[in-house]
Image (spheres, coloured by chain):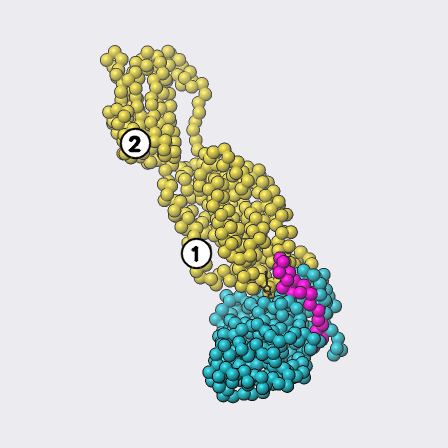
Chain colours: A cyan, B yellow
Amino acid sequence: MANESIIEVKNLTKMFNKFTAVDGINFDVKKGEIFGLLGPNGAGKSTTLRMLSTLARPTKGTAIIGGFDITKNDNEVRKLIGIVSEKMIMYNRLTAKENLWFFGSLFNIPKDVLTKRIDELLELVQLTKWKNAQVGTFSTGMRQRMNVVRALLNLPQVLFLDEPTLGLDPQSSVEIREFIKKLNRENGTTVVITTHMMVDADLLCDRIAIVDHGRIVALDTSANLKKTISGADTTIISLEISNLSPELITALRGLNCVDAVTQENTLTLRIIVHGSEAFDSVIDKVRAMNGKISSMQNLQPSLEDVFLHITGHQVRDTADQKIPQEHKRFGASQQGRIR
Amino acid sequence: MGAKTLFSHSMRIAWKDLTELFRNRLGLVLLIVMPLFMMVMVGFIYPSNGGTGANLPVGIVNEDSGFNNSTLPSQTFIMGLEIMNNQTHFLAFSNVTTMADIKDMVQRGDLEGGIVIPSNFSQSILTGEQGTVIVITDNSNLQISAQINGYSQLYIEQLSTVLAQKNVQSLNATNALAVVNPYSIQLQGVVSGTTNYFDFVAPGIMAMTVMMSVMTGLPVAISQEKEVGTMDGMMVAPINRLSIILGKTLGQTARGLLQGVIILVLAIGLFGVAIQGSILLVFALLLLGVFSFVGLGIVITSFTKDQETAQMLMMTLMFPMMFLSGVFFPIQTMPWYMQDIAKFMPLTYAADAMRKVMVLGAGISAISTEIIILIAFGAIMTAIAVPVFRRMMTR
Ligand SMILES: Nc1ncnc2c1ncn2[C@@H]1O[C@H](COP(=O)(O)OP(=O)(O)O)[C@@H](O)[C@H]1O
Ligand SMILES: [Mg+2]
């Protein structure tokens, strides 16, 4: 039971005109698992999720969910799944209860069952008090809870969530994560979640597929993914330089032992290096350029490092981060290190 | 999936849309204000000018030089005109010296037209010839011009009948009138009482508003849900895709009919329009009009990605329809090529049928042609629209 696949994705491809948004991806999701699709904006996560939830038609390939082909038995698939999409699926002028009634009634759930279920779901996300208030008056956190609960009306076996914590305050993010975990633990709901936030993937997912440019570039548990870095001769160092300059960063990137450099804040760099001489080379370079090292630390690899290591660019896009950064990568290709 | 579930899902969607509509205060106000504006505008731009008391200023020029020192015929004629006009007040007469003066005054706007009695008038009458009277109108203003023409002709015909009667009587006929006019025509409006321009436009405006309201409402309602993302909530439910479009159409139709009712109430209450025919038939026609149109709305919905494009496209289509479908001006007065274009617009037939029912009190049989054409329009458009919509829904 534990290892049974509930989703089998086969060569799933989506093209928009000539642009390939999802490029022939393959993966399985096990029953009862929380599966993450991690990747930067534009990687094709949402498109993948939309195809899996029958909202978009694959250009090529397909997926089997609970034994049904998404391209052939879409209505059967729909009965098994729930989707929390990037956008709120809620009518602002309807009350919480009316919204749930409307969407629930499209699933042919008997009236008495639906009434009871709506009450339970509202209770579950502590919105009972607001059930007769229009959703338009809700806070972002409340709305997102509603949005998640809406997807649960048909008690889905598989729940798809597209960036469920996007735009939420930390408190609400924690709540949503806890809720997803609880749902998975208590109801055995299989969860497929997309995110570009490392924390989400790290804290929530049993396995993570790293997606970039429409392809899966790595797929494993968070721990195993990190091991691919620390297991090799790769090291991550945090370097604080009190007189940090762009020229210095460029110079560091030019070093052979340096795989990637990202700027954490005005003074701190995060550097992925390899080889036993790496520390010395870095320090020598900084000295040679009259840089003043105020602190140096050896770091545990994060998923961010894994991503950077594999793809050569950062997960978070520039819009997310105010600190200017460069995306270019150096060093040899490490594709071979990840299976 | 059964027709029953299809319908029940459609009803839920329609009900949801209407609930949203009724909670949208501003939208609701606009829904009422829009037709009110249209009615008031139309009502005041085109003065109600049928009936009596139009009092259009018309100058009379008497150039009659008499015959045997007698100008009796022209004096009698003018007196006759005045006597008749005193009862109806269609026109307001004033004396003018020359024909050139009349043209001047018409150009200045002091007069709307003139009646000229030529110098040989008495001579012609008294020597057994036809006396000709010249009617001058401002033919840059077709409506007024046509009215003056009409009234003058009416007066002059009646006067000539009176004169002829007298002439024939002197021939000792038993019934003089029977000799002059072996056939008598009694002019009578099809509608009792007086009709005005408003009676003419109200049915058309009603048909237009309801049909346009559905046709524009549908693409906007659907593209809005696509944009906001709520469409996904319906799309991921195991329902027939057709119930979405059907539900939306039902919702928009209800909204359109509501607007129709508002117009009707305004037309009756504010503008004195009377409905001669069956009000049930009026609403049945409105529904049929919507049916004939809705396919076009669906096709447009399928091809437009966002609200803005949908709205612009609808405006572009609506504009010619408003003016070519005979809502504001009779089609018969348009140039032939425009009339041909009008024949391809369902609104033309809907407006026409509505007018026949509302103004002339026609029953179903009298408008069967329009009904058949509207059904045909609807059937063809729906046949095109449904597959197009299905394809759009599974991008
Ligand atoms: N409907 C569409 N038409 C054209 N291009 C699209 C469409 N949807 C997504 N894309 C493109 O496909 C790529 C992947 O998008 P998406 O799946 O939304 O990425 P993600 O969710 O990972 O940020 C992006 O480059 C995006 O611009
Ligand atoms: Mg996305």
Residue pointed to by mark 2: B106
Question: How far apart are the two marked residues, 1 and 2, measured between alpha carbons?
Answer: 42 Å
Residue A289 in sight here: yes
Residue B300 falls within the magenta-colored stretch: no
Q: Residue at x 57, y 76 (%)?
A: A254
The amino acid marked with disc number 1 is Leu
Q: Is residue A37 left or right of residue B115?
A: right
Q: Quadrant of residue A220?
A: bottom right
Vertical placement of residue B111 versus A309, above or below:
above
Position of residue B124 measured from the top left corner of the image (x, y, whole percent): 32, 14
Magenta range: A12-34
For the residues carrying marks 1 and 2, which lies nearer the camera in this image?
Answer: 2
Position of residue A259 measured from the top left corner of the image (x, y, whole percent): 60, 78
Q: Nearer the viewer, residue B142 or A32?
A: A32
Q: Residue at x 60, y 74 (%)?
A: A330
For residue B232, which numbered disc appears in the image? Answer: none
Q: What secondary structure is found at the residue carrying circle 2?
A: helix
Q: Decide: few, some or many residues near mark 1? Use Cα within 10 Å; few <14, some 14-19, many ≥20.
A: few
Majority secondary structure of magenta residues? strand
Q: Is residue A25 left or right of residue B324?
A: right
Vertical placement of residue B303 versus A58, above or below:
above
Vertical placement of residue B5 versus B364, above or below:
below
- State which chain disc 2 sits on: B
Q: Quadrant of residue B66?
A: top left
Q: Nearer the viewer, residue B264 or A107?
A: A107
Q: Residue at x 30, y 14 (%)?
A: B123
Quick one: label 1 or label 2, which is nearer the N terminus? Answer: 1
For residue B30, which numbered disc appears in the image? Answer: 1
Q: What secondary structure is found at the residue carrying circle 1?
A: helix
The amino acid marked with disc number 2 is Val
